[in-house]
Amino acid sequence: MNARKALVVALVAAAIAAFFIFDLGQYLKLDFFKSQQAAIESWRAANPLQAALIFFAVYVAVTGFSLPGAAVMTLAAGAIFGLLWGIVIVSFASSIGATLAFVIARFLLHDWVQARFGDRLKALNDGVRRDGAFYLFTLRLVPLFPFFVINLAMALTPIRTWTFYWVSQVGMLAGTLVYVNAGGEIAKIDSLAGILSPGLIASFVLLGIFPLIAKKIVATIKAKKALANWPRPARFDRNLVVIGAGSAGLVTAYIAAAVKAKVTLIEKHRMGGDCLNTGCVPSKALIRSAKFLSHADRAREFGMQRAQVDFDFAEVMERVRSVVQAVEPHDSVERYTALGVDCLQGEARIVSPWAVEVKTAAGTQTLTTRAIVIAAGARPFVPPIPGLADIGCLTSDNLWELRKLPRRLLVLGGGPIGCELTQCFARFGSQVTQVEMLPRIMIREDPEVSEMVTARFRKEGVDVRVGHKAKQFVVDNGEKTLICEYVGAPGGATVNGEVRIPFDEVLVAVGRIANTTGYGLEELGIPLAKTRTVETNEYLQTLYPNIYACGDVAGPYQFTHTASHQAWYAAVNALFGSFRMFKADYSVIPWATFTDPEVARVGLNEQEAKEKGIPHEVTLYGLDDLDRAIADSEAHGFVKVITPPGKDRILGVTIVGEHAGDLIAEYVAAMRHGLGLNKILGTIHIYPTLAEANKAAAGNWKKAHAPQKLLEWVARYHAWRLQ
């Protein structure tokens, strides 16, 4: 540290030390000011210029050295100098003081911080160079952080000192007005009755609503800035245009039509999206047929000597197709047209924040619209593994075209889709090898959940290969082969070596990637998040405030039910955002993996609670104890509830077992509406049903938290009653 920096540090330290050693803060408290109000006002009346200069200098010193008391001084300015002069004095003193703090922090810390962390701060620095004035104005207008923190933080960035000063001067003016006005009203209180004075009440109401007004102003400025380069049409063809007719798009359009908005829904492929055509509906139809076969294999468990099922895989797949056809009318053009939605089949391209170009079989048209909702969905991710493109692969998109059962099926991926389809094809008779590079399948679930599903897979003949990383696909002597690297076992031991797995067909199920290209995002500069989904704020708005995104294309969850959930927020905000905006709520999101045993979750599981360091208790109920599960020969699995220590509030639930996806609904409702385990315990459940497991789990929690001391006295009471 050079001599000049050492001197500045010494001066700052001395000033701060003196402030606390001599307890100067007592003079910057509201009660001191009130006690000396008459004397201060009298002296100010006799020496107006001197009083203003002294007050100005003290205010600059307090803010310049980041000392506590600036808020009280702002109120005092209104009381001492009145509204007009109070605003003038505080406005300039606060801005000069903030700039002084900024300059001191920059002199002492800027070079060191940039030298040490410059690479990591590059994106931030670029943003500040480009939009630093706007960022600072937003922070000043809506003070999310204390002003001294803003002064320090901005000093570490490349923003110019003059820019910092004038933006602070303008940005803090509205807040200064509110506080000085409130101070002027406080000064008029002479008795308790004055507390109810209209002026003071109005001042505090203004203090309360100021952040909301400021936030609205910032949002308006931000919107105008984003849309500045795009001419706004004189009138609009539509209130809303929705791109994509999957779950998110359908619900968005439905809501818009229900509130009588003029809405157009554009789909380039098939109505219903992935869920209807290649996802939820066909996969559950396939799972149902496979489960029927599994029950035949378990005939002796149900008291039968044997059961034989003859089937043709092509007929099974035709049944799947017929199920999709039976559900299609729910998502059809005819239904949505009858609801009031203008449905177009064609390719959409956003050509401006106000216009969407649509290429249809009949030609190209451009629709102007007040708002746009992107619901373009996602597609299976096919990793760039050498050789995979040459041999071809199945995904959840093209799997449904199969009419011949693969003799040897390789499934790449141990997530929900991979696990569901692994078990299905094994039950139909394929020799299935499941390859997962992580230490276990279903990695997001608790370890015992993965172990239970893995054990069932292996019992049914699946070759589960965890800790295997796919390296290359080759054709070896006419036989398709995957070359893997064995990277480790669940126990932690690592044994590096090459493993070769022959197969006839490979199903790739390693995740899904959002559809973010081909419809104008790049041209409009709409950014993507790190997850390669469309970047949105908490209201589902993109870079442009009238363009929203929801469903798989936006994340953070890729479930049909969360897409529908997001669609409500996107539709309502797009249509009524000028009056009120709603933040998308992800506080209670359930999901299920439809393996056998079924796995359902909502909220935290045990491994997440441990990873995040959240204090918790675990309550467990085994389904092997449940009467209905025993009667159905499905006495396996458990209900696991996570709660805070000593409290019945539900933080999360995992259910493994028959119909887990149905059983979880009671806990989802309880969490959504703030009901605890005591309420579930006090609810009548039909006997004998699987749903009784929820009550039994609540009973186990209650038993573990029984008031033992009280029960000892109750036992003594009953013993006394026997005498």
Image (spheres, grey):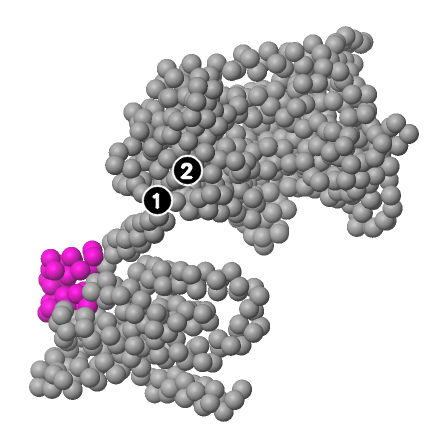
Q: Which amino acid type corresponds to the residue marked 1 in the rendered image?
A: Trp
Residue type, numbered disc 2: Val
Q: CA distance from mark 2 to mark 1?
A: 10 Å
575 left or right of 470?
A: left
User: Could you say where residue 360 lies in the image, as x and y percent from the top left?
Assistant: 46, 22
Q: Nearer the viewer, residue 624 or 32?
A: 32
Who's the residue at 34% across and 73% down the image?
162
331 lies above or below 566:
above
Q: Residue at x 52, y 29 (%)?
A: 560
Q: Is residue 555 left or right of residue 418?
A: left
Magenta stretch?
A: 179-206
Which SS class for mark 2? strand
Across and down, in percent, residue 17 comes to 40, 86
The answer to whether residue 649 shows anywhere in this view is: no
Residue of label 1: 230
Is residue 112 within the magenta segment?
no
Which residue is tagged 2?
351
Image quadrant assignment for residue 577: top left
